[in-house]
Amino acid sequence: MRPPSVPSPGDDVEATEAVGSPAPASAALEALYQERILEHFRHPRGKGSLSAPDVVATARNPLCGEDVTIMASLDRTAEGDRVREVRFMSDGCSITQASASMMTDLVRGRTPDAIDDLAALLRAVVRGDPAAARDETLGPLVALSALARVPARIACAMLPWEALAQGLAAGRRRPAASGQRPAVRSDPNG
Amino acid sequence: MRRADFPLLVRQPRLRYLDSAATAQKPAAVLDAEREFYETSYANPHRGAYALSTRATECYREARHTVAQFFGIADDGRLIFTRGTTDSLNLVAATWGRTHVAAGDEIVVTRLEHHANFVPWQQLALERGARFRIAELTADGRVDLDHLRSLLSSRTRIVAIAHVSNVLGTISPIAEIAALAHAVGALVVVDGAQGAPHLQVDVDALDADFYAFSGHKMGSPTGIGGLIGRRHILEQMPPYQTGGDMIALVGDDRTTWNVLPHKFEAGTPNVGAAVGLGAAVSYLERIGMDAVREHERTLIASAMAQLSALPGVRIYGPPANDRSGVVSFTIDGVHAHDLATVLDGERICIRAGHHCTQPLHRRLGVAATARASFFVYSDASDVDALIVGVGRAQAIFAAPPVSGIRAPLSTTPHAASVSSESR
């Protein structure tokens, strides 16, 4: 066996807590549970439902079993769809709810393609891309850049975006004029 | 109590590992035994053309004997080495189940089963046209024996039950349930994943027809576990997998099977892990399973008392004396996943989620709970750290008072509304 005096990844090294430590250092925790995120958790925007949504989709986090259901109404124009309003329903964790809350503010008036781009940008940010984190289109989502140091929670932040993307993709696969109502399962666990 | 025996915990002195129900850390005795085996005795067992292979075979045989003794089994052939509990339960479903469950028969499970002792039976029932029935729980999280009894009939083929719930910690009265099942001619299949590491288990005293367990929750390497059955039942069963080692004679158009336990162990066995499992049960026997149980009972009683004294904490399951070293709980205003992250920041490892028991969590009415679980290396300072950490999480999430954060949804989290639609 390795002599105990030789530190290796995974050993506690008191002076340099971050070395090889998979646990989030407390600075990362403070960044994650900063007021900008907790405030959205406590006062979620867009939480609830729409009476006549054009899009309804649910995504589930297989890790914890929580889910997010989103409803969106669309403005359908000759140039394509734009999101008019989004609501979400979830009992999920603070990260899921804060991300969903910010999302309902940010996607209003955007096209599905622009929303896909924003979700991709957020994904890059939470994975630690520093250039992406400087992108001004993130708005309040920049607070979620703290997840780069708490990767176990990335799925929580992306869950509402997955639900919305799946809902919009299902809506896009058919012409607006058709009366069909395709049912698309968006639960990754089926 | 035994932290010094576990190298990972020695090297990370501030780590508070409270996820032993998911998997246990490994004592040096196990790591040393496995390494010693690979360095002195490793070859493919049962290929005894040379002395080294004979030695490997002997190590494998000894490991089986040690583990069988641990479970009170005198006939080593009744212990099949598998990949673990999931593998063992699927083995029973795929062999005994497929040959003995017919259309119109019934399979009974309970509400607290882990998916590994739920889904194989559900799928077997669907495949065979059998009826799948779920025994519900009492308000304090025990199997409701009156309800279970009401589900049993001459059509019942299998009663599948966890020895210990991985969420509620409930220790089920297996012998009593076996008597009910046997009275109607059904077999009892026990998921011992959470029983074997924490309780003195005498499989025949429990009167279980099958007892499945995982080594990794007992301190062994991953990838090894076992299935203990009754010899006459195992002998009637068709093989699970076919191939090397499990055959007696392979003709051009037919094959005969090896004797027990080899009939159910196709392919090169995980002999190194089996040696590790033998060392793990020897380690537990040196402590004594009664001492393990008492140690964990003390910890769980302390954890439950301290948790329930905190505001907004809800504990699920029976009182400490009737449960193993597992406590699952929720905190008002703090999601289990957030609690786990906050605790992780304090180097405290807990599980958050449904713990592979979605049918149970649906009944509890929550999608996710937080779970702390203990083993021989846990001590009172782990419990203290947990309580402090829960308090820290509550402080982070203590809101300027706001209404509506946890407002009930118009749909339940598990409603089948998983559709996207557009007009």
Image: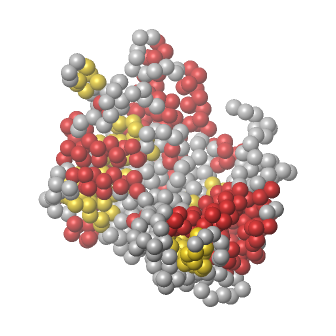
Q: What percent of the width, then of the height, locates residue A85?
A: 60, 79
- Furthest residue toward top: B50
Q: What percent of the width, then of the height, locates residue B144?
A: 31, 70
Query: Horizontally, is B232 left or right of A53 in the view?
Result: left
Image vertical order of residue B325 relative to residue B210, above or below = below
Query: Horizontally, is B142 left or right of B155 in the view?
Result: right
Q: Residue drawn at (75%, 72%), measured in percent from left and top?
A: A140
The answer to which image quadrant residue B164 occupies is bottom left
Looking at this view, is B182 or A33 the one in front?
Answer: A33
Q: Residue drawn at (54%, 49%), measured in percent from left and top?
A: B23
- Looking at the picture, the colour scheme in use is secondary structure
The answer to which image quadrant residue B236 occupies is top left
Image vertical order of residue B328 relative to residue A35, above or below = above
Q: Residue drawn at (72%, 66%), measured in percent from left and top?
A: A144
- Furthest residue toward left: B154
- Count of picture labels: 0
For the C terminus of chain B, give its image quadrant.
Answer: bottom left
Q: What percent of the width, then of the height, locates residue B407?
A: 55, 84
Q: What percent of the width, then of the height, locates residue B153?
A: 16, 62
Image vertical order of residue B344 relative to residue B362, above or below = above
Query: Horizontally, is A142 left or right of B138 in the view?
Result: right
Looking at this view, is B10 or A56 the one in front?
Answer: A56
Residue B241 is at least partly visible in this image:
yes
Q: Residue drawn at (47%, 53%), measured in percent from left and top?
A: B198
Residue A96 is at least partly visible in this image:
no
- Furthest residue toward right: A15
